[in-house]
Image (cartoon, rainbow, N blue to C red):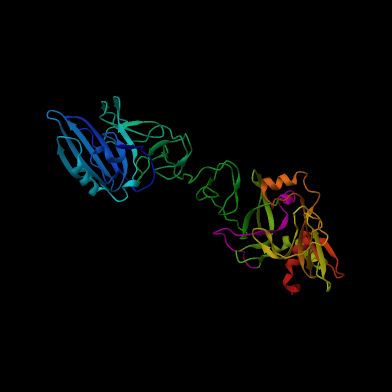
């Protein structure tokens, strides 16, 4: 007989069942959850399954087959009982009396009773007979050895009478939601109790459930509510897929203006002080309202809801994940100075009437290449939408290995903005070893990136990202 180690895997809905103990008059016995019977099986040694101690309480899959064999003396005989697991417990499916151990006739009958998915059946032991005299934790009755059940719990074995349920006990070692009120119980501040509808599982429970328990773990630091976008004092809110006020404590702002929380770009972290007005770009999360019409500087940039709007900074906080800002939509009075500055910048960077084409040339260095991309709009993930252009490559001045002298060229048009990336030499001294270790496409030089445009005279000049944004703000007026 092959004994398989008892494991815990979700193969079927578990059913709590009491495995029969050894009856009076029997000198020995064994219990087996049968998981397989080979075609040539003729005796008990040919059965595959999971061993259980007589008198154990276990969670078994619906339809599992339990074999109980008891040996009697004077006269010597074997009682063989086949039990099937049903939603209501164990039901007898067959019984045989023999003067010898399990034989071919019984093996054939067991094969007919075996479920088709028996090979995937598993067992989770919930309780075993108490090995020593104990006292029932529920009713206080004295229990001789083997007369009660020692339940396996996170706090150790808990012994009860067989009819008695497991009462709340010990101190909860882990935090979780209360089994009674579903409020949050901090580790060490409650008790353990059986989880409803989950045999062998235990959940924390309050000593005395509060009138308004927090549905999630308390917040240790002050932050902003996901629902109302106002500040939550430390220790007063809870976390549940985001920070929330305690139930019934959300305070909707009276101004009616939408609010957002967003990550501050690292290069601008020193400029986001409360009270400033900044242009933000944001994609509303699931359930967050879209950008209302009529807000100062408000524009939808993509079908995904990616938007831009002028926002008033209310608060900032810095965590290990970066700096975050709480903002609301700016009023027209607050937005006037920034709108005027943006208008002046748009006039200063407006496209001219130039018609000359320009040539952008980038030399390859030890296999590292450059690229040119036309900026065509905004992107929620990368900030800007880029259309990469195909280069024309010139090998006339290249050396024998192509490490120097290979030129890539692109034609740039006026009334457009581009981003250019080019390698900066010299390469790393061990660049060959770097390529051998990381692959042929590993970069071995530094990279220079810049935004550029073509002037009326056909010259290529660098511009700032703010100028790019100003061009894109009126792109529909000049792109053709």
Say which residue appears at 30% left-offset and 41% top-offset: 48
* Front residue of this view, candidates 221 and 379: 379
* Front residue of this view, candidates 192 and 69: 69
Does residue 89 appear in this view?
no
Quarter that holds the C terminus? bottom right
Vertical position of residue 158 compared to residue 283: above or below: above
- Secondary structure predominantly adopted by residues drawn in magenta: loop
Q: How many marks?
A: 0
The part of the chain drawn in magenta is: 266-293
- Location of residue 303 in the rendering, given as x and y in whole percent from the top left corner: 61, 66
Q: Which residue is situated farthest in the left direction here?
A: 75
| The quadrant where residue 201 appears | top left
Say which residue appears at 57% left-offset and 59% top-offset: 288
Q: Is residue 98 left or right of residue 380?
A: left
- Location of residue 331 in the rendering, given as x and y in whole percent from the top left corner: 69, 61
Say which residue appears at 54% left-offset and 48% top-offset: 245
- Location of residue 181 in the rendering, given as x and y in whole percent from the top left corner: 41, 45
Vertical position of residue 300 compared to residue 75: above or below: below
Q: Is residue 236 left or right of residue 309?
A: left
Q: Which residue is situated farthest in the right direction here?
A: 457
Quarter that holds the N terminus? top left
- Does residue 476 show up magenta in the picture? no
Q: Is residue 450 left or right of residue 149?
A: right
- Location of residue 58 in the rendering, given as x and y in whole percent from the top left corner: 31, 39
* Front residue of this view, candidates 283 and 337: 283
Does residue 241 appear in this view?
yes
């Amino acid at each position: 007989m092959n004994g398989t180690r008892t494991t815990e895997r979700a193969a079927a809905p578990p059913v709590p069942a009491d495995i029969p103990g050894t009856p009076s008059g029997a000198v020995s016995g064994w219990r087996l959850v049968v998981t397989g019977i080979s075609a040539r099986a003729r005796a008990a040694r040919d059965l595959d399954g999971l061993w259980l101690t007589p008198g154990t309480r276990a969670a078994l899959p619906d339809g599992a087959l339990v074999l109980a064999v008891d040996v009697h003396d004077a006269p010597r005989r074997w009682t063989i009982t086949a039990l099937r697991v049903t939603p209501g417990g164990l039901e007898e499916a067959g019984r045989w009396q023999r003067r010898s151990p399990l034989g071919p006739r019984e093996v054939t009958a067991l094969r007919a009773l075996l479920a088709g998915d028996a090979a995937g059946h598993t067992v989770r032991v919930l309780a075993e007979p108490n090995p020593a005299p104990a006292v029932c934790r529920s009713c206080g009755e004295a229990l001789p050895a083997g007369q009660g059940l020692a339940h396996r719990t996170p706090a150790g074995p808990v012994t009860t009478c067989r009819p008695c349920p497991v009462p709340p006990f010990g101190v909860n070692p882990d935090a979780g939601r209360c089994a009674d009120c579903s409020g949050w119980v901090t580790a060490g501040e409650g008790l353990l109790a059986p989880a409803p509808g989950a045999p062998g599982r235990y959940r924390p429970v309050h000593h005395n459930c509060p009138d308004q328990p927090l549905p999630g773990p308390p917040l240790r630091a002050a932050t902003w509510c996901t629902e109302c976008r106002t500040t939550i004092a430390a220790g007063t809110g809870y976390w549940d897929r985001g920070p929330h006020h305690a139930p019934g404590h959300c305070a909707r702002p009276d101004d009616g203006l939408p609010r957002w929380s967003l990550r501050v770009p690292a290069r601008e972290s020193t400029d986001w002080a409360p009270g400033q007005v900044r242009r933000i770009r944001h994609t509303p999360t699931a359930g967050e309202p879209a950008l209302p019409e009529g807000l100062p500087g408000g524009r939808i940039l993509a079908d995904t809801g990616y938007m831009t709007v002028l926002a008033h900074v209310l608060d900032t906080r810095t965590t290990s994940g970066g700096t975050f800002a709480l903002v609301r939509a700016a009023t027209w009075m607050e937005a006037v100075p920034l709108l005027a500055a943006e208008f002046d910048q748009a006039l200063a960077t407006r496209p001219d009437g130039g018609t000359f084409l320009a040539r952008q040339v980038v030399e390859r260095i030890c296999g590292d290449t450059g690229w040119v991309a036309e900026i065509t709009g905004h992107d929620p993930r990368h900030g800007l939408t880029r259309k990469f252009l195909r280069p024309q490559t010139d090998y006339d001045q290249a050396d024998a290995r192509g490490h120097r002298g290979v030129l890539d060229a692109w034609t740039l048009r006026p009334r457009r903005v581009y981003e250019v990336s080019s390698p900066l030499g010299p390469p790393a001294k061990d660049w060959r070893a770097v390529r051998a270790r990381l692959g042929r496409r590993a970069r071995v030089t530094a990279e220079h990136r810049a935004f550029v445009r073509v002037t009326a005279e056909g010259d290529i000049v660098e511009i700032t990202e703010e100028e790019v944004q100003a061009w894109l703000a009126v792109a529909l007026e000049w792109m053709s």
